Image: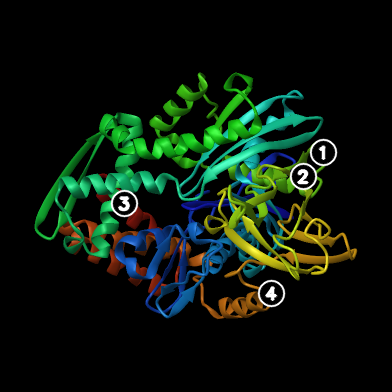
Amino acid sequence: MIVGIDLGTTHSLIGCYDEAGPRLFANALGELLTPSVISVDEAGQVIVGQPALDRMVSHPQVSVASFKRWMGSPRETRLGVHNFRPEELSALILRSLIADAEAALGEKVREAVISVPAYFSDAQRKATRAAGELAGIRVERLINEPTAAALAYGLREKPDGARFLIFDLGGGTFDVSVLEMFDGVVEVHASAGDNFLGGEDFLDLLEQACRADLELDDSQLDASQRGQLRRRLEVAKRSLGSHGHAGIELSLGERQLSWQIDEERFTRLADPLIQRMRAPLERAMRDARLKPEQLDEIVLVGGASRMPLVARTVSRMFGRLPLRHVNPDQAIALGACVAAGLKSRNQHLDEVILTDVCPYSLGTEVARRDEHGRAITGFFEPIIERNSTVPVSREQTFWPISDRQKQLQLDVYQGESPLVERNIKLGELTVDIDPALSTQQNAVTVRFTYDINGVLQVEALVHASARRYELLLEQNPGLLDAQQIRARLAVLDEIKIHPRSKQENLAMLARAERLYEEHLLAREQLQDWILRFRAALESQDEAIIREHRREFSRALDALESV
């Protein structure tokens, strides 16, 4: 069985494709959404999902979220006695999801299709594959999130020539893709985005405004209090969308604080983020060479797309209402399930070919001569332009700067800046040339070939000698190689993770501890409830534990509703 996974910044989901269509699996708490949060308890055991999210308030120093934004970097996070790379944190989320899938299917899961932001770089995609390996699965394919959303909406069933714009604003990333359906092919014409723009950034705006209004600086808030504040502001952000206004109440020691905001002020605060959204939208349309009226549909996905100001922005730009009838939190996961069904050649699915594009331009450094004939280095020469359909192969011919030059240095870069210093260097290739020949006789043809797995092959042919040079870029600086993955896998296998069967009890205690942090007047009552529930757990009688858990849950629901 091949499963489909949406490995999100704020939430993750898993499912499969069967005779009834795409199906998502619930976690141990009965929820489809598993928060992408990791925590470590006092005994050093790893906690994943909702209990970890609650511990972001009660135990912020040993909890972490939004680590998807760090994928492709060597950054490490210390939780208790453990140091985790972003790939390892993502692998822990994947392991939890896989356990949920195996519990639902009754069989082992070994293969998966995982969705990634369309604008993820080569390094970020390889880090996602590494996370899959660390979780013990083979990643059959990475599917771009907007393409997955198109599959969820059944856009593959639309008439040939239909064009769609997929607008995907998640918790931490923003993607926009323009797709066309033609003769069983879902072709991506253009992708653009911002890997550091999402719902978390809108939440940051609310926090900054609230702290400014209440005159709260960092010295007045510890990590736990800031966690309480952000949680209440997240609830307020959702309330803004449905009611047009929202407020929070916050206890800081003996101080009782209150703060209000309305949709109008929120829209003004968010204007810089809205402007950042417009740039990728305009770039994607420009790269696809389309006008708004040439689009057949506009689809909104991603949890943050629920904000009314987002829908208003898109409607104004394109002069029509976007589609939003599929749950925006689930659309990408459902599409990943369809992609998994296509990969396994499910008999209930018509054959569909999915194309991807190269999200960034790939090229080399060149020198240009100024008006005085001086050679100025540091310029970027694209060989494969962004949004080229992959697999793709392109070539260009270059010459040395001066006579009697012995070598030609080919530095390979990824990016969109005209200057290489602002792009990302991927590697280098040194080519020997004959110093006895003139610059014009020392022509070197360079070919870049980029495949669907993100592997870049660089070939250089020296015309005078017919000698060939090759560079294969499968790895990026800072990423784990095969040997490091094996070593990290051994370490992860030794780390104890709370078993799935205990997740409901763990979540109940984590929720109670979070409420203890938030509700000063109910602390004695909460301690009593926690004590009684721990006593029930000590009994090891599942019937007693189940009954106490129901009572505990009702009590906590009542407390949170006040």
The answer to whether 321 is drawn above or below residue 155 in the figure is above
Number of the front mark, 4 or 3? 4
Q: Residues within 10 Å of mark 1 (few under 14, many from 20)?
A: few
Tell me which label, 4 or 3, sits earlier in the chain: 3
Disc 2 residue type?
Leu
Q: Secondary structure at mark 2?
A: helix
Residue 220 on image: x %, y %: 16, 61
Can the viewer see residue 485 in this picture?
A: yes
What is the spatial separation of the Cα atoms under label 1 and label 3, in whole angstroms? 44 Å
Q: Earlier in the sequence, mark 3 or mark 2?
A: 3
Where residue 231 is drawn, which disc sits there?
3
Could you say which quadrant of the image residue 326 lies in? Answer: top right
Mark 4–mark 2 distance (CA, rounded to whole Å):
28 Å
Of mark 4 and mark 2, the one earlier in the sequence is 2
| Of pointers 1 and 3, the one earlier in the residue sequence | 3
Badge 1 is on which residue?
Answer: 351
Q: Residue furthest left?
A: 254
